[in-house]
Amino acid sequence: MTEQRLSTWETRTEWPMAVLAAAFLVAYAWQVLHLSAPAWLHLALEIALWVIWLVFAADYVIRLMLAERKLRFVWRHLFDLLAVALPMVRQLRALRVVTVLRVLNRKASTAFRGRVAIYVGIVTLLVSFAAAIAVLDAERGNPDAGIDSFGKALWWTLTTISTVGYGDVYPTTWEGRLVAASLMIGGIALLGVITGMIASWFLERIQQTEDTVNKTVRATVHQETDELHVELVTLREEVSRLREQLANQKPS
Amino acid sequence: MTEQRLSTWETRTEWPMAVLAAAFLVAYAWQVLHLSAPAWLHLALEIALWVIWLVFAADYVIRLMLAERKLRFVWRHLFDLLAVALPMVRQLRALRVVTVLRVLNRKASTAFRGRVAIYVGIVTLLVSFAAAIAVLDAERGNPDAGIDSFGKALWWTLTTISTVGYGDVYPTTWEGRLVAASLMIGGIALLGVITGMIASWFLERIQQTEDTVNKTVRATVHQETDELHVELVTLREEVSRLREQLANQKPS
Amino acid sequence: MTEQRLSTWETRTEWPMAVLAAAFLVAYAWQVLHLSAPAWLHLALEIALWVIWLVFAADYVIRLMLAERKLRFVWRHLFDLLAVALPMVRQLRALRVVTVLRVLNRKASTAFRGRVAIYVGIVTLLVSFAAAIAVLDAERGNPDAGIDSFGKALWWTLTTISTVGYGDVYPTTWEGRLVAASLMIGGIALLGVITGMIASWFLERIQQTEDTVNKTVRATVHQETDELHVELVTLREEVSRLREQLANQKPS
Amino acid sequence: MTEQRLSTWETRTEWPMAVLAAAFLVAYAWQVLHLSAPAWLHLALEIALWVIWLVFAADYVIRLMLAERKLRFVWRHLFDLLAVALPMVRQLRALRVVTVLRVLNRKASTAFRGRVAIYVGIVTLLVSFAAAIAVLDAERGNPDAGIDSFGKALWWTLTTISTVGYGDVYPTTWEGRLVAASLMIGGIALLGVITGMIASWFLERIQQTEDTVNKTVRATVHQETDELHVELVTLREEVSRLREQLANQKPS
C-alpha cells in the first residue's frame, strides 16, 4: 500500500494549487501595497484571500482523508499543516509562498539540474518579495517602526538575506520579527537545500563512474576472452581432427 | 590496553547522562523563566540543579579513575572538564546542553546519515533555546540591557545565529557576552562539523567505489580466465588421449 | 546555424571592450574623487564617459543585428542590455565594471584554473573599488549621509562585503542603496560562481579518472590477451605441423 | 637553478623566525596591555621590538641577496615585504602574526592533515588575539572610541570574525579600521585556505583511487593470464613430446 490515491490527487492538484498560491500572494501584496484602495476593492481582495485559503484547507482535509495512514501523513506533512494554519494570522499570509516553492522545488530536482543559479535566483526573488510585503504589513501599524514603505521593506529584506544587517532598519513588532525569523530560517534552509543538491550530484556522478568502469571491465574482459575461447575451440577441433586422422590411419 | 573499563562505563552511562543533562536544562530554564515562582520552588530547583551537577562531577571523577592513562584522559576530555567546571558559574549552566549534544552527535554519525538537515535542525533548536535562557539570565539584572524578556532573548539568538546582527539588541554584561561568545564559537564549530560530515561521506563513497571496482575487476577476470582454464584442461586431456591413442597404435 | 558572425564579432571586440570599460571606470572614478577639478576637466571627463557609453550602445546594437535569432539574443544577453541601459543613471555607472569582469571571467575558466584565490582576489578588488566610488558619488549629496569621503566609502564597502555590517556607516539615499544592493547581490553571485568552478573541477577530475581507468582496463586486458593469442597461434602451428607429420607418415 | 641557497636558508631559519615573531607579539601585547608599566620596562620592550624587527629586516635582505632571480623573489614574497615594512607603523605590528602563521601553515599541510578543525582553531585564536591587541592599541587614544579595554577589544574581535557585527563596538580611527580590514580580509582568506585544503584532499583521494584501481587491474589481469601462459606452455610441451613420439614411431 503505497498511498496510491494520495499521490494521484497530489500530482493532479499540484499545478492548480501553485497557481492558487501565486494568486493568493498577488492578492495579499495588492492589499498591502495599494493602501488608498477603495473599501470595496479591499473587501473583494479580503474575500478572495479567504476563499483561496478555504480551498487550501479543503485540499489538506481531502489529502488527509485519502491517506491510508493518517498519523504518518500528519507527521510527514507538518509543514503543510503550518502552511494552512498560519496564514489565518494576517502577517503570516506571505508564508503561502511555500506552496509555490514546493512545486518549484519538485520541478527543480529534474528540470533545473545544473542550473542551480537560476533555481536559487528565482527562489530568492520570490521569498524576498513575500518577506518585504509581509514585514511592511506587520510594521506599518507601529509608529516607531523604521520600515514604513515598500522600498524600505525591500532594503531591509536585502540587508537581512545578505546577513549584512546594518541595523538602520529592523522589525520592531513581534509579527515583523516572526517574518524576519521565517526569512532567516528560510535562508539557512535554502543553503542546506543547495548544499544537498550539489552533494547528491557528486554522489550520483561517482555512482555513474563506478557503473561505467564496472561495465567497461566486464565488457572488455568478456570480449577479449571470447576471442580466446574461439581460438581454443578451433584448436580443439584441430586436435579432434588429428585424432580422427590417426584413427583412420589405424587400419593401414 | 584500550581503556576497556572506561568505554564500558561510558556506553552504559551515555543515555542516563543525556537525560540528566536535559533535566538540568529544564530545571534551569524553569528557574529563569518562572520569575514569580514561590521561594520553595526556586530553592527546590536550585537543589535539583546542584544535585545533578554533583552527579556529573562524580561521573567525571569515576571516568578519570577508570582511565588507564589519566593525563591522556584529561587532555582528550578537556571539554568534559569545562562542562563540569563551568556550570558552577550561574550563567554558564546552559553549557550543560553540550552533554545532550554529545550523545546526539554520537548517534548522528550512524542514525542521521543522509539526514544532516534533521540533525542540524535539532542541534540548532537545542543550542538556541539554551542560549536564549542563558542570555536572559545574564542580562536581566542589568537595567541598561536590551534583552529583558524571553521573546527578546530568542530574537537576539536568531539575529546572532543568522549572523545578521542588526544591533537592536545585544548583550551588555560580561556574562551575556560570554554566552554570545559560546553561541558564536558553537555556530562556527557546527559549520565545521557539518563540513566534516559531508566530506567524510564523500571520502567513504569514493572508498566504496574503489572497493567495488576492484572487486569487479578481480571477480570478472577470475571468472573469465577460469573458463579458459577449464577449456585448456579439456584440451590437454584431448592431447593426452591422443598420445595414448598413438601409443596403442605402436604395436600395430 | 550557430551564430557564427556574432561570436566572431564578440571574440574580436572582447579585449577592446574590456579596455574601454576600464577607461570608463577610471574616468568615472576621476570625476568622483577629483572634486576640485576645473570645469573644463569635469566636462572633458563627462564627454569621455558619454562617448564610451555610445560605443558600448553601438556594440550592443551591432551584436543584436549580427544575431540570427534576435529574441533569443535579447533574452540571453539581458545582462548586457542592463549594462548598457543602466549606466545612463549617473550612480550606476560603476556597473560598467561588469564588462571588465565578463572578459576576466572568460579568461578565468582557462587561465586561473587552480588559482581561484587570485581570480577571486582580483574580482573582489575591482568590484570593491567600483562600489566605493559609486556609493560615494551617490551619498555625498545627502547632508545626513555617513559616507562623505572615499576612505569612509571603502570602509563601508569592506564592512558590507565581509557581511559584518556594524551599521556605523550605511547608504541613506536610494541611489546608494541601489549600489549596496548590486554589491550584495554581486557578492552572493560571486560565491555561486566560485562554488560552480570548484564543483566543475571535481566533476572533470572524476570524468578524467573514469577515462583513465577505462583506458587502463582496455589496454591491459588487450595487451595480455594479445600475448595469449600469440601463444595460441604458435600452438596451432605446432598442431598443424603435427598433422602434416602424421600425413607424411601415412605412406609408411 | 632552483634557488638552492635560498631554500636552504629558509628551512634553517624557519623555526627561529617563528619563535622571534611570537616573542615580538608577546612584547607588543605586553606593552599594550600593561599600561601602568614603569618607563624603563616600556622602553625595554620598545627596544626589544625594534631589535626583533631589525632581525626580520636583515632576514629579508639576506634572502633577497641569496635569491638568484631578485625581481621574481620580490614579486613572489610581496607579503613578506609588507610584513617587514608595515610593522614600522605602530598599530600594524600585530601583522607580525603572519610570520607565525606561515610556519604553522607549512606544517599544517602535512601534520594537521585531517585535523582541519585543530588548525583552524589555532589560527583563529592567534589572529583574534593579535587583532584584539592591535585594535586596542589603535583605538585607546580616541576619546570617542567604544573599544577602551582588552575585554571590549576581544568582544569586538568576536562579533567581527563571526560576521555578526552588532555595531555596539566598532573601530573609529583609521588605524583601527586598518586592523579591522586585515582581520576581515584574513577571515575571507582563511575560508579560502580551508576550502582549498579540503578540495585538494578530495582530488588527492580521487587520484589515489585511480592509481589503486589501475594497479589492481594490471596486477589481476597479469596474474591470471600468467597462469594461462603457464598452462599454454605445458600444453605446447605436451604437443612437442607428441611430435617426438610420432617421430620415434616412424622407423617402426
Image (cartoon, coloured by chain):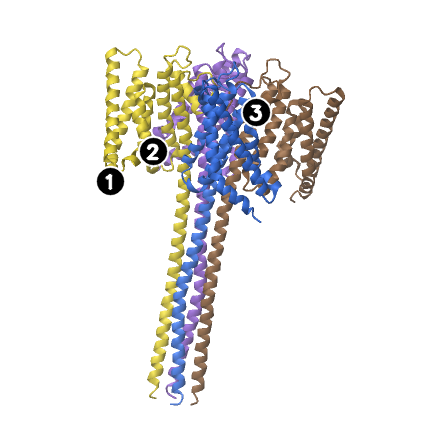
Chain colours: A blue, B brown, C yellow, D purple
Tell me the quarter of the image containing the C terminus of chain A. Answer: bottom left
Query: Residues at marks 2 and 3, common chain?
Result: no
Mark 2 surroundings: few (<14), some (14-19) or many (≥20) residues within 10 A? some
The image shows residue D236, relative to residue A170, as above or below, that is below
Indicate the position of residue A191 as horizontal and vertical percent values: 48, 33
Q: Which residue is mark 2?
A: C105
The image shows residue D143, relative to residue C59, as above or below, that is above
Looking at the image, is mark 2 or mark 1 earlier in the sequence?
Answer: 1
Q: Amino acid at mark 2?
A: Asn
Q: Which of label 2 and label 1 is nearer to you? A: 1
Q: CA distance from mark 1 to mark 3?
A: 57 Å
Q: CA distance from mark 2 to mark 3?
A: 39 Å
Q: Which residue is mark 1?
A: C4
Q: CA distance from mark 2 to mark 1?
A: 21 Å
What is the quadrant of residue C142 in the picture? top left
What is the quadrant of residue B160 in the picture? top right
Q: Amino acid at mark 1?
A: Gln
Residue lying at 41% horizontally and 43% vertically, measured from the top left: C203
Q: Which residue is mark 3?
A: B157
Mark 3: which secondary structure?
A: helix
Outermost residue, front direction? Answer: A40
| Dot 2: chain letter | C
Q: Is residue D99 visible?
A: no
Mark 2: which secondary structure?
A: helix
Q: Which of label 1 and label 3 is nearer to you? A: 1
- Residues at badges 2 and 3 in contact (C-beta under 8 Å)? no
Checking the image for residue A64, the label placed there is none
Mark 1: which secondary structure?
A: helix
Mark 3 surroundings: few (<14), some (14-19) or many (≥20) residues within 10 A? many
Q: Is residue A170 left or right of residue C133?
A: right
| Dot 3: chain letter | B
